[in-house]
Image: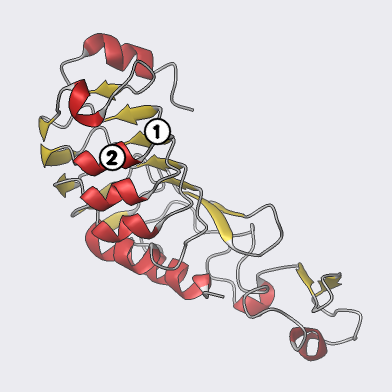
Amino acid sequence: MLNERPALLAFGDATGRRIHWRDSTGWDSKGSEASSVVADSSGKGVGHHGRHGSNAAAAATLPPQADLISEEWYGVTLEPRGSGRVGGLKLSANALTGNFTVAGDLLFPSLTKLVLLDLRANALTGTLPSSVGSLRSLEELYLSLNFLEGQIPDQLGDCSRLKKCSLSGNRFSGPVPPGLARCSALHYLDLSCNPKLVVPKATNLECTSQVKIVNSFEILGILKRRNQVP
């Protein structure tokens, strides 16, 4: 099992967790203190002291990651199946800074069970790294209102379960990658307010009436978007 805690902490450090974040509750906790209830080798619940009477004895029965991350970490939600894996990371409007090219590469390869990533309304710079394609479970991606630039990587199309994606209000440029056509579940795509982004005709992405490709000139589309983004 991948150890997601170091990746999360490295991402936090790369985006100003110790200095700029508005809320970093739980992110400074040590692994042994991160979870109040974990599972022993038989799958039954065990507290910090466990039924064995001590932290050391309980820890001996834990899966490698079970006591490393909890939902006490601000913005973190875990998979509902009890695996201890991170299923959601929601840090919108939390004063994240730094180079997202670096931060994303630190995060994406480890969080392969991530379903929701919401980093809207921060001050992230750099590019969207190609490693985003490793998020094969991702269903919702919100990176709007940052300072991201460069081309949108074609590897975003490897997120085959992607349903909603907002990259609006950045500085992306160049053509929209044709690889997005591989996201067969995609029904909401907001690319508005990226003046240098070349948005293709609907036929280039096999766009239907249920896929909304919005650019900064489509005022009606922007108005519709405001009623659809959660």
Q: Are marks 2 and 1 in contact (CB under 8 Å)?
A: yes
Residue 162 disc label: none
Estimate the x, y position of residue 82 in percent, counting from the top left. Answer: 71, 60
Going by the image, does 226 lie left or right of 56? Answer: left
Identified at 22% across, 49% down, the residue is 154
How many marks are shown on the rendered structure? 2
Earlier in the chain: of badge 2 and badge 1, it is 2
Estimate the x, y position of residue 187 in percent, counting from the top left. Answer: 40, 27
Q: Amino acid at mark 1?
A: Leu
Residue 25 in sight from this viewpoint: yes
Query: Alpha-carbon neighbours of circle 2 within 10 Å: few (<14), some, or many (≥20)?
Result: many
Above or below, 200 against 68 in this view is above
Q: Of residues 227 and 53, which is closer to you in this image? A: 227
Q: Amino acid at mark 2?
A: Leu
Q: Of residues 26 and 155, which is closer to you in this image? A: 155
Residue 186 disc label: 1
Q: Which residue is mark 2?
A: 180
Going by the image, does 52 lie left or right of 109? Answer: right
Identified at 49% across, 28% down, the residue is 230
Query: Element type at marker 1?
Result: loop
Above or below, 58 against 218 in this view is below
Query: Element type at marker 2?
Result: helix
Query: Alpha-carbon neighbours of circle 1 within 10 Å: few (<14), some, or many (≥20)?
Result: many
Identified at 42% across, 41% down, the residue is 162
